[in-house]
């Protein structure tokens, strides 16, 4: 079996250390520094030739991260690795999956090409597949897609009595239905219209049959927090208690978390992105995937 090493990209060390321990892979040492003019210098200090290197980088801040990530992957190849695998618990640039306005870049395609050219395989958790039905529509490398729904369902079973799972928009039905089935709870989806980056309108269906249950908003991503916030406000206006919010990817841009807290009860997320709302670990999910035969 190929020797495996784990390389944590800057900022990913705590997660990568947990994963490395779970997988039993030694870590790969890298030194990053900047030249006086701001360019990046990278040195790999571990012998990597012939190994599979698992590069851990959650892509919550993709623009500053991508160049270093590409440098790392291409350097590892130069140094003779057998395989370079990207473990991106959160994969960015999946939502721009069409030209929403004339002249806009479909960045999901361009980002996928950059990653596909540099890595041999991608492992990720709940990428935002909406108009794309599978990763191979834009990724040219094998992609292992893991699902956090069973973990969210287990957290709900342990922590919320009589939940009603609420998807804030129709596209959330795919994961909301799975979470609801796992939690043994009913689900509904709301109707969302996005008017701008931070402007959404949400309409509730008739939910009277579920009165008495605890509303739990479940979404894949919280970014500006406006989707969760508007959904919570509409629920409260309709006579429901403040909902529990559960998300896979806690992006929480700017002050989104503090703002959302004003309108909801508890906020819980997985640790695909390090955040103080993290309560559900996906380390075992990834390490289980790594223990199975892959390409
Ligand atoms: C929709 O495309 C996603 O599933 C999320 O609902 C969306 O990304 C949340 O964005 P925000 O927190 O900015 O409303």
Image (cartoon, rainbow, N blue to C red):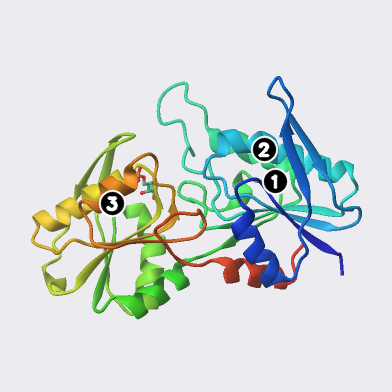
Quadrant housing residue 154:
bottom left
Residue depicted at x 85% and y 44%: 77
Position of the C terminus by quadrant: bottom right
Query: Along the line of sight, which residue is nearer the eye, 123 or 13?
Result: 13
Q: Which residue is mark 1?
A: 140
Mark 3 and ligand 1: say if the CB distance to the nearest ligand atom is below 8 Å: yes
Q: Is residue 103 left or right of residue 5?
A: left
Between 28 and 132, which is closer to the camera in this rendering? 28
Q: Are marks 2 and 1 in contact (CB under 8 Å)?
A: yes
Q: Which residue is mark 3?
A: 228
Q: Would you place residue 57 above or below residue 187 in this image?
A: above
Asked which secondary structure carries label 3, the reply is helix
Q: Is residue 140 above or below residue 125?
A: above
Residue 141, visible in the rendered structure: yes
Task: Name the disc covering residue 234, or none.
Answer: none
- Give the Cα separation between the discs numbered 2 and 3: 31 Å
Quarter occupied by the N terminus: bottom right
* Label 1: element kind: loop
**Is 144 rendered above or below residue 293?**
above
Count of numbered tags = 3
**Does ligand 1 reach within 8 Å of label 1's beta carbon?**
no
Residue 265 percent across, percent down from the top left:
23, 61
| Disc 2 element | helix
Check if mark 3's residue and mark 1's residue have beta carbons within 8 Å. Answer: no
Name the spot of residue 215 as percent of width and height, x first: 22, 66
Q: Quadrant of residue 17?
A: bottom right
Q: Residues within 10 Å of mark 3 (few under 14, many from 20)?
A: many
Q: Is residue 132 left or right of residue 144?
A: left
Mark 2 or 3, nearer chain start: 2
Task: Answer left or right for 174 relative to 97.
Answer: left
Q: Which residue is mark 2?
A: 113
Point out residue 246 in the picture as x, y percentages from the top left corner: 35, 62
């Amino acid at each position: 079996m190929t020797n495996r090493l784990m390389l944590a990209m800057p900022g990913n060390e705590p997660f990568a250390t947990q994963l490395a321990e779970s997988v039993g892979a030694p870590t790969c040492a890298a030194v990053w520094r900047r030249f006086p003019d701001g360019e990046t210098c990278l040195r790999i200090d571990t012998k990597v030739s012939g190994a599979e290197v698992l590069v851990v980088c959650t892509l919550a801040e993709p623009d500053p991260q991508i160049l270093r990530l590409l440098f790392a992957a291409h350097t590892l190849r130069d140094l003779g690795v057998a395989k370079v695998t990207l473990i991106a618990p959160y994969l960015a640039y999946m939502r721009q999956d069409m030209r929403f306005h004339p002249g806009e870049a479909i960045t999901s395609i361009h980002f996928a090409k950059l990653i596909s050219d540099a890595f041999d395989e991608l492992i990720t958790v709940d990428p935002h597949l909406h108009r794309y039905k599978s990763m191979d529509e834009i990724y040219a490398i094998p992609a292992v897609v893991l699902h956090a729904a069973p973990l969210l369902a287990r957290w709900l079973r342990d922590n919320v009595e009589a939940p009603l799972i609420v998807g804030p928009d129709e596209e959330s039905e795919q994961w909301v239905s799975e979470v609801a089935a796992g939690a043994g709870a009913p689900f509904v989806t709301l109707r969302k219209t996005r008017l701008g980056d931070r402007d959404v309108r949400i309409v509730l269906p008739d939910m009277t049959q579920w009165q008495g249950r605890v509303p739990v908003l479940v979404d894949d991503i919280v970014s500006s927090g406006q989707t969760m916030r508007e959904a919570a406000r509409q629920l409260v206006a309709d006579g429901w208690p403040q909902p529990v919010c559960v998300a896979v990817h806690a992006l929480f841009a700017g002050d989104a978390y503090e703002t959302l807290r004003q309108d909801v009860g508890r906020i819980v997320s997985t640790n695909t992105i390090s955040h103080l709302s993290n309560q559900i670990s996906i380390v075992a999910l990834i390490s289980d995937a790594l223990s199975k035969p892959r390409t």
